[in-house]
Amino acid sequence: MSLAIVPLAGIAIPMVVVPTVLFARHVGRNRQYGHLERMQALKAGVALPSTVRPPGPGAVVAIGAGVPTVCALAAVMATHALPATPRDEELIVRLAIVWGVAFLLGLCALATALVLGLLLHRANAKAATTRDASAKPAFDPDPFDAPVHDFR
């Protein structure tokens, strides 16, 4: 083992730690600003937007097309890495396992993308109908008025 690895590790550790700390501070500040914004909106009586964001169409496409593609590429690389043995039965079994797993993972990804696509379509359709049909404001101040009692 070379002693040159110790100074290289000493140089490399700050190169990993400093960006990690800066990123953590950035995420923390964004979370704090979001919290302050929500508290100010509550204090002002403004309706809060929903914080739950469903996956967009890009996530559905990434799951539906990206995962099966990566599975097929991984199966091709695993097939290429298999050693050529004189016994063809072992090779056929190994190939069947590699491609079967790739096929099952791709099929699961396609099913997941189908379900997410249906949920996304249903959410967009529900948002479109509620947005058009609702003329009532999100916040009605009348029910929240305190009754004034005049006890004279």
Image (tube, rainbow, N blue to C red):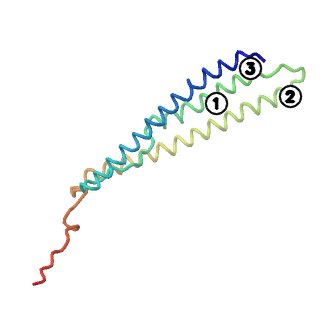
Q: Which mark is residue 80?
A: 3
Q: Residues within 10 Å of mark 3 (few under 14, many from 20)?
A: few
Front residue (pair 108, 16): 16
Q: Which mark is residue 71?
A: 1
| Residue 69 image offset from top left, x and y in percent | 59, 28
Dividing the picture into quadrants, the one containing residue 11 is top right
Residue in view at x 44 percent, y 38 percent: 27
SS class, disc 2: helix
Give the mark nearer the N terminus: 2 vs 1. 1
Residue in view at x 90 percent, y 20 percent: 86
Question: Looking at the picture, which amino acid does disc 2 mark?
Answer: Glu
Mark 2 lies on residue: 90
Question: Looking at the picture, which amino acid does disc 1 mark?
Answer: Cys
| Residue 96 image offset from top left, x and y in percent | 77, 32
Question: Looking at the picture, which amino acid does disc 3 mark?
Answer: His
Give the mark nearer the N terminus: 1 vs 3. 1
Q: Is residue 116 left or right of residue 88?
A: left
Give the mark nearer the N terminus: 3 vs 2. 3
Q: Residues within 10 Å of mark 1 (few under 14, many from 20)?
A: many
Q: Is residue 32 left or right of residue 24?
A: left
Residue in view at x 19 percent, y 66 percent: 142
